[in-house]
Image (tube, rainbow, N blue to C red):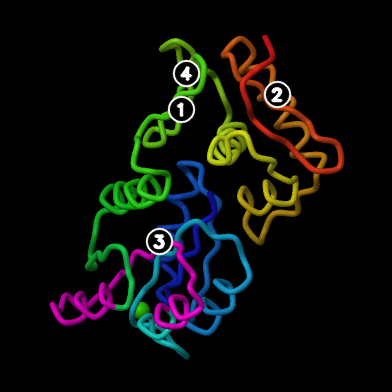
Amino acid sequence: MRILIAEDDSSIAEALQFALTLVGYAVDSVGDGAAADEALKNQGFGLCILDLGLPKLDGFEVLRRLRRRSGAIPVLILSAREKAEDKVMGLDLGADDYLAKPFSVNELQARVRALLRRGQGGAPVVSYGDLSFDTVGRTASLNGRTLPLSLHETGVLEVLLQRFGRVVSKDQLVEQLYNYDHDVNHNTIEVYVHRLRKKIAGTGVAVRTLYGRGYMIDYAAQ
Ligand code: CA
C-alpha cells in the first residue's frame, strides 16, 4: 500500500516516513502543497497524510482540488492548530480523519490502519479458503498458524487479496509496493511472487500467472 505524506516540517516527515515504512507501507514524502497536488494527480496512492500549513498551496486547497477531481483516496489531516473550525472545515472539504500535533506515532499508525480498513470494507480479517489475512497486524495465517512472509511478500499478498479474482499487472504491483526512490523492475516482483506462491501452498488459494497481463489470486484448482 502506498502512502503520500505532505508535510513541510522535515523532522516530522522523516519520522512519519520511518514509522510507516517500518510496518511495511511504501511511503513518498513531499514538502509543499503544489507537489502534493501533482503527486495526487498522477500516482496510485492508497492514503494521503496531509499537513494543513504547507507552502505554495495549503492543505485545505490540496484537499479541495483532490475532491473536485473526484479523487476518493482517504485523507488524514495533520494540523498544528488545534482549532475547532480547522477541523470542521477539513472534514467538510472531504477529509476522513484529523489529528492535531503533537501526536504519538502509535496513534497515527492506528488511524492509518482504520482508514485503510474502511476502504477494504471494514473487516479487520479477510479469509479465503484456509488462508486468513489480518489487515491490522498485516499477517497471513493458515488454519491459525502464521505464515513466515517477508514485508515485500506480505505487500504483494495484500495487493492481490484486495483484488481477489481479478488481474493485477506487474506495473500495478510495482506502483503499490514502492516509492519513488526505489528502482524496481518486474524481475523483483517475479521473485516475490515465486516465494509467496510456495509459502501459501496448501491454503486453498493460489497465485496464477496470466502471461502478458499479470497475476491473479484465486481459489486453487482441486
Ligand atoms: Ca506545516
Dot 3 or dot 4: first in sequence order is 3
In magenta, the rendered stretch is 63-92
* Residue identified by numbered label 3: 74
Dot 2 or dot 1: first in sequence order is 1
* Mark pair 2, 3: CA separation: 31 Å
* Mark pair 4, 2: CA separation: 15 Å
Quadrant (top left, top right, bottom left, bottom right) of the C terminus? top right
| Ligand 1 lies under 8 Å from the Cβ of mark 2 | no
- Mark 1 neighbour class, 10 Å CA radius: few under 14, some 14 to 19, many 20 or more: many
* Residue identified by numbered label 2: 195
Q: Amino acid at mark 3?
A: Pro
- Mark 2 neighbour class, 10 Å CA radius: few under 14, some 14 to 19, many 20 or more: few
Residue lying at the far right in this picture: please name it. 212
Q: Residue 135: which quarter of the image?
A: top left
Dot 4 or dot 1: first in sequence order is 1
* Mark pair 3, 4: CA separation: 28 Å
Q: Is residue 24 left or right of residue 82?
A: right
Label 3: which secondary element: loop
Examine the structure image and report whether residue 23 is included in the region drawn in magenta.
no
* Mark pair 4, 1: CA separation: 6 Å
Dot 4 or dot 2: first in sequence order is 4
Q: Residue 85: which quarter of the image?
A: bottom left
Instruction: Judge whether 70 appears above or below 55 on screen.
Output: above
Identify the residue shown where x is 40% and y is 49%: 116
Residue lying at the far bottom in this picture: please name it. 56
Q: Are marks 4 and 1 in contact (CB under 8 Å)?
A: yes
Q: Position of residue 10 (x, y in %)?
A: 44, 71
* Residue identified by numbered label 1: 133
In depth, the one of 215 and 57 nearer the eye is: 215
* Residue identified by numbered label 4: 141
Instruction: Judge whether 52 appears above or below 134 on screen.
Output: below
Mark 4 vs mark 2, foreground winner is: 4
